[in-house]
């Protein structure tokens, strides 16, 4: 555990999306780092997705990205230099879209291709959002559909159709910027983004951090087209089962719940949507504001009460 500091607002204690450090009474720095292996065959698309994924942590903390640095692991002997150039261009275009500035980076020769960003953002110290800020009665909004892990697995198996693949790429490469801008207009308790632990796993982090019980409305969770069908065929990433094994002690799962539904709830996501807890009085206005901007947001859960350890109940 890192040594504490009086200006450290968010550190290692709650498995949050980024670290936050107060610089002045009006400015706090958000710092995050993330990188991943290719999830699509197109290097430019991969660069866009990896950059959007890295930038997402700043949005989840309620902040604005300022600067970014490239992190690259590249197998020089296995890929043409053009692959790296296109990946970096995809990342740069997404950085510019966010309003941030690329200020450098680091690369190494590595057998497995990886790319991502270290991102620095800013937020007012009094307006930092965390994954554990949820309150009893809060409604949980999800801003992107789930199923990207399953679709990516189908793509690797050469079973994913072109239309669904394009939709997956669009979902993963879309910044969470607009969703973050909308949520700041409402009474938000907590926020996180959905990535490798899947929807259920990240909800459990919120529940455990806030010591609350969260009801997940599985029937209301938006799913990418065809993802359920491919899950039925067994095209489920191995991370799905690891997520479920790790999270099940903190979950209440009805015995009759469909296995495919569970696969979708625990499906690891890349550059997924924001999970936002808002006051019940604000939830419909928040959803409408997001939908007006073309954000496919949905009400997927509710914070139902206190719990000594934190728990998620699937319904």
Image (cartoon, rainbow, N blue to C red):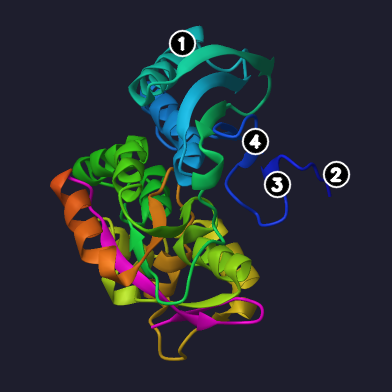
Q: Earlier in the sequence, mark 4 or mark 3?
A: 3
First to last magenta residue range:
294-315
Mark 2, secondary structure of its residue: loop
Report the mark closest to the observer, 1 or 4: 4
Horizontal side of residue 273 vs 295, given as left or right: right
Q: Earlier in the sequence, mark 1 or mark 2?
A: 2
The residue carrying mark 1 is 85
Q: Residues within 10 Å of mark 4 (few under 14, many from 20)?
A: many
Q: Residues within 10 Å of mark 2 (few under 14, many from 20)?
A: few
Residue at mark 3 to residue at mark 2: CA–CA distance: 10 Å
Callout 3 touching callout 2 (CB < 8 Å): no
Q: Which mark is residue 11?
A: 3
Q: Earlier in the sequence, mark 4 or mark 2?
A: 2
Residue at mark 4 to residue at mark 2: CA–CA distance: 16 Å
Q: Which mark is residue 22?
A: 4
Point 67% across, 25% down: residue: 111
Up-down relation of residue 148 to residue 86 (above or below): below
Residue at mark 1 to residue at mark 3: CA–CA distance: 35 Å
Mark yes or no: residue 59 visible.
yes
């Amino acid at each position: 555990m890192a040594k504490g500091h009086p200006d450290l607002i968010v550190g290692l204690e709650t498995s949050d999306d980024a670290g936050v450090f107060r610089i002045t009474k009006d400015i706090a720095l958000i710092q995050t780092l993330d990188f991943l292996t290719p999830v699509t065959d197109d290097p430019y698309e991969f660069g866009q997705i990896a950059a959007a994924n890295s930038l997402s942590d700043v949005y989840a903390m309620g902040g604005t990205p300022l600067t970014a640095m490239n992190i690259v692991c590249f197998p020089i002997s296995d890929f043409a230099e053009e692959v790296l150039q296109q990946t970096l261009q995809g990342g740069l275009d997404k950085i510019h879209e966010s309003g941030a500035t690329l200020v450098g980076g680091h690369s190494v020769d590595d057998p497995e291709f990886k790319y991502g960003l270290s991102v620095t953002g800013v937020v007012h110290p009094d307006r930092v959002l965390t994954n554990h800020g949820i309150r009893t009665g809060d409604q949980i909004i999800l801003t992107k559909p789930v199923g990207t892990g399953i679709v990516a697995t189908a793509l690797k198996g050469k079973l994913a159709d072109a239309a669904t693949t394009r939709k997956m790429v669009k979902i993963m490469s879309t910044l969470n910027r607009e969703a973050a801008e909308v949520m700041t207009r409402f009474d938000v308790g907590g926020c996180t983004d959905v990535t490798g632990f899947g929807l259920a796993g990240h909800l459990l982090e919120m529940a455990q951090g806030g010591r609350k019980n969260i009801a997940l409305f599985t029937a209301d969770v938006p799913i990418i087209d065809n993802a359920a069908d491919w899950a039925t065929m067994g095209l489920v990433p191995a991370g799905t089962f690891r997520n479920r094994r790790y999270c099940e002690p903190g979950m209440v799962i009805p015995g009759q719940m469909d296995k495919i539904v569970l696969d979708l709830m625990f499906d690891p996501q890349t550059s997924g949507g924001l999970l936002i807890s808002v006051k019940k009085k604000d939830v419909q206005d928040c959803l409408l504001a997001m939908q007006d901007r073309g954000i496919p947001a949905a009400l997927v859960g509710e914070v139902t009460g206190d719990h000594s350890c934190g728990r998620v109940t699937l319904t």
